[in-house]
Image (cartoon, coloured by chain):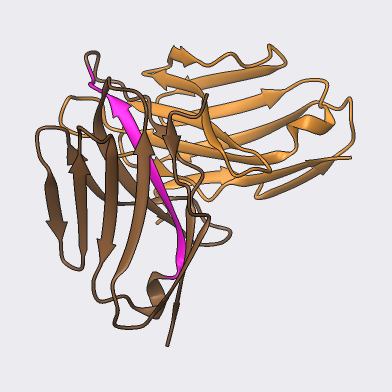
């Protein structure tokens, strides 16, 4: 039962253009959403997050949008740079009542930004 | 100054063997995790420890036994290795608290069982 889905396994974008990565989830108990970036032979690194009480969070070139009614979130990268080429994982977590997290990850989208 | 480190980075072994993967974090976090990324690239949580206490155990075969000697270390021991155990195993850590959902990952250990 895949609760977090990234239906596009790959995305190619030209440098300077916008990259839009999408993520859908099924569990209405998810309360917090994160995007991680992963380079080959490295672990995932945290990129940006959003709480369910918000619909947008921005950090520099990265913006995450959340549509709770559609159970959909997206990551926008503007402008895209070749160094952004990596695999991007969407992750979600139910509200932390105990202080411990239980992240559920999507399968990732490989972004290739060409010069 | 690696925040979350794992050893070894690569591990090739035969079916039936017993092996261990070590993880250490120097971030002062209270909670540590083990994840498995299989051939289909699913990254799934296996275990979580908080202050040396097991808090999450996600339907993992009991051939897998995590051990946390102190809150900076979480090791993973696997008995009687099977072909299906081949995967990349990631260790992660996070601070305890209601403010942060971020987890910090190690570089991964690629386990190949032949």
Quick one: A63 or B20, which is closer to the camera? A63
The image shows residue B73, relative to residue B42, as above or below, that is above
> Which residues make up the magenta segment?
A85-96
Quarter of the image that includes the C terminus of chain A: bottom left
Q: Position of residue A27 (x, y in %)?
A: 34, 23
Q: Where's residue B6, x and y in %?
A: 56, 44
Determine the residue positioned at 72% across, 16% down. Answer: B63
Instruction: Write down the colour of chain B.
Output: orange
Residue B14 point in image, percent of width and height: 90, 35
- Magenta stretch contains residue B91: no
The quadrant where residue A104 appears: top left
Q: Nearer the viewer, residue B70 or A4?
A: A4
Residue at figure coordinates x 25%, y 36% from the top left: A70
The chain coloured brown is A
Task: Depth check: give the residue in front, A24 or A88.
Answer: A24
Tell how many labels. 0
Along the horizontal axis of the image, is B86 left or right of A13? Answer: right
Report the residue at 12% width, 43% height from top: A55
- On the question of residue A82 being in view, the answer is yes
Instruction: Left or right? Give the position of A83 relative to B107.
Output: left
Q: Is residue B4 above or below residue A92?
A: below
* Residue B102 point in image, percent of width and height: 29, 39
Q: Residue furthest bottom?
A: A115
Q: Quadrant of residue A80?
A: bottom left
Q: Is residue A35 above or below residue B50?
A: below
Q: Is residue B101 visible?
A: no
Question: Main SS type for the magenta part?
Answer: strand
């Amino acid at each position: 039962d895949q609760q977090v889905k990234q239906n596009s396994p790959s995305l190619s974008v030209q440098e300077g253009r916008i990259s839009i990565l999408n993520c859908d989830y099924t569990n209405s108990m998810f309360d917090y959403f994160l995007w991680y970036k992963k380079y080959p032979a490295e672990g995932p690194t945290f990129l940006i997050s959003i709480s369910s009480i918000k619909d947008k969070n921005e950090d520099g070139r990265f913006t995450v949008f959340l549509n709770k009614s559609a159970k959909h979130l997206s990551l926008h990268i503007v402008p895209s740079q070749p160094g952004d080429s990596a695999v991007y994982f969407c992750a979600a977590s139910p509200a932390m009542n105990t202080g411990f997290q239980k992240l559920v990850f999507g399968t990732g989208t490989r972004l290739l930004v060409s010069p | 100054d690696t925040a979350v480190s794992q050893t070894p980075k690569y591990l090739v072994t035969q079916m039936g063997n017993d092996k261990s993967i070590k993880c250490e974090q120097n971030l002062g976090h209270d909670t540590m995790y083990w994840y498995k990324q299989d051939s289909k690239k699913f990254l799934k949580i296996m275990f979580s420890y908080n202050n040396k206490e097991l808090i999450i155990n996600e339907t993992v075969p009991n051939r897998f036994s995590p051990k946390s000697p102190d809150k900076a270390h979480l090791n993973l021991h696997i008995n009687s290795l099977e072909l299906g155990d081949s995967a990349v195993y990631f260790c992660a850590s996070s601070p305890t608290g209601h403010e942060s959902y971020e987890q910090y990952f190690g570089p991964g250990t690629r386990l190949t069982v032949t």
